[in-house]
Image (cartoon, rainbow, N blue to C red):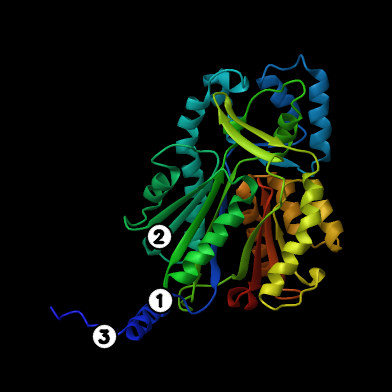
């Protein structure tokens, strides 16, 4: 074995360390190389849901609350949602799930700790196929969920389901809520750009089973949540310096940032209790997002010295609710079709928390492939959640979509 090279001076040491770091980093920006989505098999129209919900929770003695849920559902901009809990066998086996005052967290976690990674695997399998390389080429896994809280965590089970190699570097993001997908993608960008050759699998999956229970007087959060949230999983392969022979870059991830709005930590909260996960969404959240979103965008584009006109961008915005999209469109002065991808995902799937923005990205990709790339090459991915936290990722159309 050859002896290790001797470093004779501090200057030489600095040069060697700098060269090592340079070689460890990628040459270009992170890119999206594959996308996949999945939902549970059980689906219900928004019009049918109030009757179903009040029937299975034995709550027909609250007709005024049922009328309120019907009104919220009608105004939600949602036509249907996919939900694991719509399987009647689940509630027949666990009647305690409908009463938040009964201890049920253990049973919920037992189900979701298996079902959530399996749903994530369905989306990830599609993303890997879309990418075109074997699962064993994945070097990093980021798994985002609030639905499965158990160790070993869902990332471990997911890695086994996908056949990832034992050396894959795993990270779990928990309880980020609706900004979880944006956070996971930003972390994937940083891993890909600072580890030459890295291929990062981002998997987000959520199931409302963890927070499914009957209505209560004065608990408006329950009504709003049951009108909005659905189940789904989204997966993305992220890597820098794509191999043109086998990889097709879809979107460049040019810049990413996170902003926390001061004095808003009480507005969106989640907490696991004995009866499941309680969540709270305070009033005025859409307006708070609207009053901060433009500055987030200005700061992001200033960081890369790009002067952007909002109507020249394509938009992958988390559709937290119809009101949020309406406020964003109004504040930014966007044209009627600017948030069409977000509105379609909301209409067809509801709000799937952190997973939803991956569905929006997939819908944008579908539109570009069907109709060609129209307008400018720049876009913005944005997600919002507890904190109140705003995730911003600046995207650029990559060569794989420009060929269409």
Mark positioned earlier in the residue sequence (3 or 2): 3
Hey, which quadrant is residue 65 in on the image?
A: top right
Classed neighbour count for the residue bearing mark 1: other residues with Cα under 10 Å, few (<14), some (14–19), many (≥20): few
Which numbered disc, 3 or 2, marks the residue closer to the eye? 3
Residue located beneath label 1 in the image: 21
In the structure shown, which secondary structural element does the residue marked by tag 1 occupy? helix
Which part of the image, by quadrant, shows the N terminus?
bottom left
Q: Are marks 1 and 2 in contact (CB under 8 Å)?
A: no
Q: Residue at x 79, y 63 (%)?
A: 338
Classed neighbour count for the residue bearing mark 3: other residues with Cα under 10 Å, few (<14), some (14–19), many (≥20): few
Q: Residue furthest front?
A: 10
Residue located beneath label 2 in the image: 135
Q: Residue furthest top?
A: 61
Which part of the image, by quadrant, shows the C terminus?
bottom right
Q: Is residue 227 visible?
A: yes
Q: Position of residue 362 (x, y in %)?
A: 63, 59
Number of numbered discs: 3
CA separation in Å, label 1 and label 2: 27 Å
């Amino acid at each position: 074995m050859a002896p290790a090279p001797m470093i004779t001076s501090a200057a030489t040491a600095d040069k060697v360390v700098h060269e090592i770091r340079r070689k460890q980093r990628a040459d270009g920006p992170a890119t999206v190389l594959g996308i996949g989505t999945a939902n549970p098999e059980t689906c219900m129209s928004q019009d049918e849901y109030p009757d179903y919900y009040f029937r299975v929770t034995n709550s027909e003695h609250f007709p005024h609350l049922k009328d309120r849920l019907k009104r919220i559902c009608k105004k939600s901009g949602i036509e249907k949602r996919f939900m694991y809990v719509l399987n009647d066998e689940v509630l027949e086996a666990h009647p305690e799930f409908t009463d938040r005052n009964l201890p049920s967290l253990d049973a919920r976690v037992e189900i979701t700790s298996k079902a959530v990674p399996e749903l994530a695997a369905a989306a990830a399998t599609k993303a890997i196929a879309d990418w075109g390389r074997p699962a064993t080429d994945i070097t990093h896994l980021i798994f985002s969920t609030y639905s499965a809280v158990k160790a070993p965590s869902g990332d471990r089970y997911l890695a086994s389901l996908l056949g990832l190699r034992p050396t894959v570097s795993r990270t779990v993001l928990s309880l980020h809520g609706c900004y979880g997908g944006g956070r996971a993608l930003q972390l994937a960008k940083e891993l890909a750009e600072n580890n030459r050759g890295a291929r990062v699998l981002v998997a987000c999956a959520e199931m409302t089973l963890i927070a499914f229970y009957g209505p209560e007087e004065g608990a408006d959060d329950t009504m709003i949540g049951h009108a909005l949230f659905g189940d789904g999983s989204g997966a993305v392969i992220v890597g820098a310096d794509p191999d043109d022979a086998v990889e097709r870059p879809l979107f460049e991830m040019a810049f990413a940032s996170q902003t926390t709005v001061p004095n808003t930590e009480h507005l969106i909260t989640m907490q696991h209790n004995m009866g499941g996960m309680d969540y709270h969404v305070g009033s005025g959240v859409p307006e708070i997002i609207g009053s901060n979103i433009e500055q987030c965008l200005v700061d992001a584009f200033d960081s890369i010295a790009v002067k952007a006109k909002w109507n020249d961008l394509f938009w992958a915005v988390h559709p937290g609710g119809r009101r949020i999209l309406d406020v964003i469109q109004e504040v930014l002065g966007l044209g009627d079709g600017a948030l069409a991808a977000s509105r379609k995902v909301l209409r067809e799937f509801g709000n799937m928390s952190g997973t939803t923005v991956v569905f929006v990205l997939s819908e944008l990709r579908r539109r570009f492939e069907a109709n060609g790339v129209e307008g400018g090459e720049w876009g913005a991915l944005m997600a919002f959640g507890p904190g109140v936290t705003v995730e911003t990722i600046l995207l650029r159309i990559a060569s794989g979509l420009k060929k269409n």
